[in-house]
Amino acid sequence: MSDVTRILESIEQGDSKAADQLLPLVYEELRKLAASKMVNEAAGRFARRFVAILA
């Protein structure tokens, strides 16, 4: 069981402090996703520019 699943179950059971544990996990995952997307977009821009130069 993942930490997120465990925390969500705790929230469902009424643990008011569980939500405080969830936010840092979700935030970190969103940062990773955003960083990955930015790298992929930068690579795509580079490839398009390179192709334009060769054309």
Image: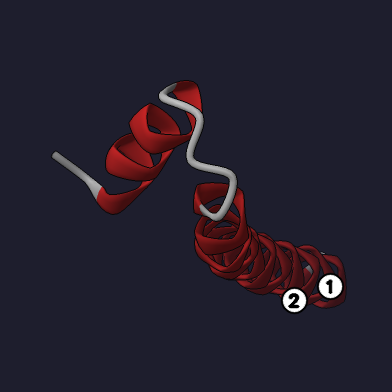
In this picture the colour scheme is secondary structure
Is label 1 in a helix, a strand or a loop?
A: helix
Q: For the image shown, how many numbered marks are present on the structure?
A: 2
Residue 31 marker: none
Q: In the picture, which quadrant includes the C terminus?
A: bottom right
| Residue 4, image x, y percentages | 37, 45
| Residue type of the residue flagged with mark 1 | Arg
Up-down relation of residue 20 to residue 11 (above or below): below
Task: Give whichever of 35, 22 is nearer the camera.
Answer: 22
Q: Is residue 18 left or right of residue 34?
A: left
Residue 49 marker: 1
Q: In the picture, which quadrant includes the N terminus?
A: top left
Location of residue 13 by image quarter: top left
Check disc 2 and report the residue beneath it.
Answer: 46
Location of residue 34 by image quarter: bottom right
Location of residue 35 by image quarter: bottom right
Q: Is residue 35 left or right of residue 38?
A: left
| Residue type of the residue flagged with mark 2 | Phe
Up-down relation of residue 16 to residue 14 (above or below): below
| Residue 50, image x, y percentages | 75, 76
| Residue 17, image x, y percentages | 55, 55
Q: Residue at x 58, y 66 (%)?
A: 36
Q: Residue at x 74, y 62 (%)?
A: 41
Is the C-beta separation of discs 1 and 2 under 8 Å? yes
Is label 2 in a helix, a strand or a loop?
A: helix
Q: Residue at x 86, y 67 (%)?
A: 52
